[in-house]
Image (spheres, grey):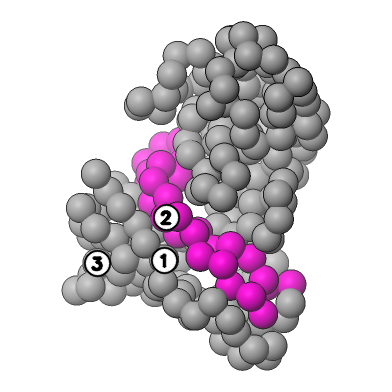
Amino acid sequence: QLQLQESGPGLVQPSETLSLNCTVSSGAISSTSHYWGWVRQPPGTGKGLEWIGNIYYSGSTYYNPSLKSRITLSIDTSKNQFSLKVTSVTAADTAVYFCARGWGGSYSRLDSWGQGILVTV
Amino acid sequence: DIQMTQSPSSLSASVGDRVTITCRASQTINSYLNWYQQRPGKAPKLLIYAASSLQTGVPSRFSGSGSGTDFTLTISSLQPEDFATYFCQQSYVTSYTFGQGTKVEIK
């Protein structure tokens, strides 16, 4: 069964760069049927989900327009891993960050998720 | 951006109740609508995709309907493990916006 695991620092200083990795196991990140994405959620019960962006095996990326100027997604097939960088972070970037696999065909959806990692700015 | 609005924001229900959650899109999204369940401290879990298709392994008490701008998630007989927050998400355009969530609580 596919597993995704986020990793990275839990505390980032304001104005610095947040960097997270997502390691995929029991499945190939090179799948042409899927894409790999990030979603975040402010801490606390009942807070909403915010889509950050997606990356395909080919390297094609799609970013949330509200974050586009500050985010970069990359993929490393040799490590079966994909990554997120957010520059110039503020307290508003404090959130639980989830990585996920998306179905890249018709009717896209996020069908497998990591457990999430809390990042505090 | 397409805005997704869920109602109600929260509801209280008893085990065995039929529960209905509504999601409205700010423009037509055909059937490009997904539903997720999130239990406290856990990652979201896909329940329904393409508005009405049940994800593999999800109990049949969950169902989805709708197209265009108005969608519904129904739980036919609420079970103890269904107390959670539910989110809708549009995948019509690649800025995959989510609804604000509906928290289902125990009455």
Q: Amino acid at mark 2?
A: Gly
Name which quarter of the figure residue B69 lies in: top right
Q: Amino acid at mark 3?
A: Asn
**Left or right for B52, reference A25:** right
How far from the left and from the top, in percent, is residue B86? 63, 34
Disc 2: CA contacts within 10 A as few (<14), some (14-19) or many (>=20): many
Name the N-terminal-most of marks 3 and 2. Answer: 3
Q: Where does label 3 land, which residue?
A: A80
Queried whether the magenta region covers residue A23, the answer comes back as: no
How far from the left and from the top, in percent, is residue B26? 77, 38
Name which quarter of the figure residue B32 lies in: top right
Q: Amino acid at mark 1?
A: Glu
Tag 3 secondary structure: loop
Image: magenta residue range: A92-121
**Left or right for A27, reference A37:** left
User: Residue sitting at 49 percent across and 80 percent down?
Assistant: A9
